[in-house]
Each structure stands twice: as C-alpha cells, then as structure tokens.
Amino acid sequence: WKGDPQLRYCQAILREFAKKVNAEFMFPFMEPVDYLALNIPDYPKLIKNPMDLGTVKQKLEEDEYENAAQFEADVRLVLWNCFKFNPAGTPVHLMGRRMETLFNTKWAE
Ligand SMILES: Cc1ccc(Nc2c(-c3ccc(O)cc3)nc3c(C)cccn23)cc1
C-alpha cells in the first residue's frame, strides 16, 4: 500500500481515530465488539459482518487493501453495524455519529 498515496492517507486517518482527544467517543469501535463481555448475545444474530478499527488497521498493515475504496468500505461497515445495533439516541449510536462526522471530514480532505 506504500505505493498508493491514498492508502498512505488511510493510516493518517486511523492515527486520528486513535488520538486520546477522540477516545471518549471512539473506544467502542477500536476493537472487535466483545458481545459476551458486553452481555449482548444477540449481536452475532443481527450483525453478520462484524468490523472494527483494530481489524482495519491490521488489514492495512498486512496489505489486504488493494485500494482506498476497500478501506473506506470497512470503516463504513463499522458505522453501519453500530447504527443497526444501537438505536438512534442511545449513547453508542451518538458516539458512532461523532465517528462518522470525523471520518467524513478527514475523508473529504
Ligand atoms: C446492553 C448494551 C447495549 C449497547 C451496547 N453497545 C456497545 C458497543 C457496540 C459497539 C458497536 C456495535 O456495532 C455494537 C455495540 N460497544 C460498547 C462498549 C465498548 C461499551 C458499552 C456499550 N457498548 C452494549 C451493551
């Protein structure tokens, strides 16, 4: 991915997501949803394609993305799963909205 400048920018976006100043609303998305620990056993019934930013980072570092569009699709999958499982107005849904705004802003740059 080092060849693709767009994919290089993806790493910069992940660093932005990981900044301490954003941790208060980014933490639910940084690692896979531990639905047993969170006591939401229905999660795998509802969410067929789990995704999280830790997995995205790993895929980027292991050259699994051929292009930036594939990276974007995984980041938006994190958001869609969040909005599907966490109803509008709930704390985690609102955190997802803040992540979405941050991503859309950086992605449009
Ligand atoms: C009873 C209940 C209700 C909601 C949640 N959501 C939630 C999620 C979550 C993130 C992404 C996602 O696609 C789905 C769920 N992550 C968390 C965390 C880290 C702490 C607390 C709640 N969390 C957990 C338990």
Image: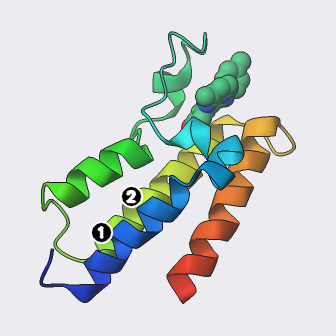
Q: Quick one: label 1, few (<14), some, or many (20+) residues within 10 Å?
A: some
Point out residue 62 in the picture as x, y percentages from the top left corner: 13, 54
Q: Amino acid at mark 1?
A: Gln
**For the C terminus, which image quadrant?**
bottom right
* Nearer the observer, 29 or 45: 29
Whether disc 2's CB lies below 8 Å from ligand 1 is answered: no
Q: Is residue 86 above or below residue 79?
A: above
Point out residue 89 in the picture as x, y percentages from the top left corner: 87, 43
- Return the residue at label 2: 74
Q: How is the image coloured?
A: rainbow
Q: Is residue 23 visible?
A: yes
Q: Is residue 41 above or below residue 48?
A: above
Q: Is residue 92 above or below residue 103?
A: above
Q: Residue at x 36, y 78 (%)?
A: 9
Q: Is residue 83 visible?
A: no
Q: Is residue 3 above or below residue 83?
A: below
* Nearer the observer, 109 or 52: 109
* Nearer the observer, 78 or 30: 30
- Return the residue at label 1: 70
Q: Quadrant of ligand 1?
A: top right
Q: Secondary structure at mark 2?
A: helix
Q: Residue at x 63, y 79 (%)?
A: 105
Q: Residue at x 73, y 57 (%)?
A: 97
Point out residue 17 in the picture as x, y percentages from the top left corner: 53, 57
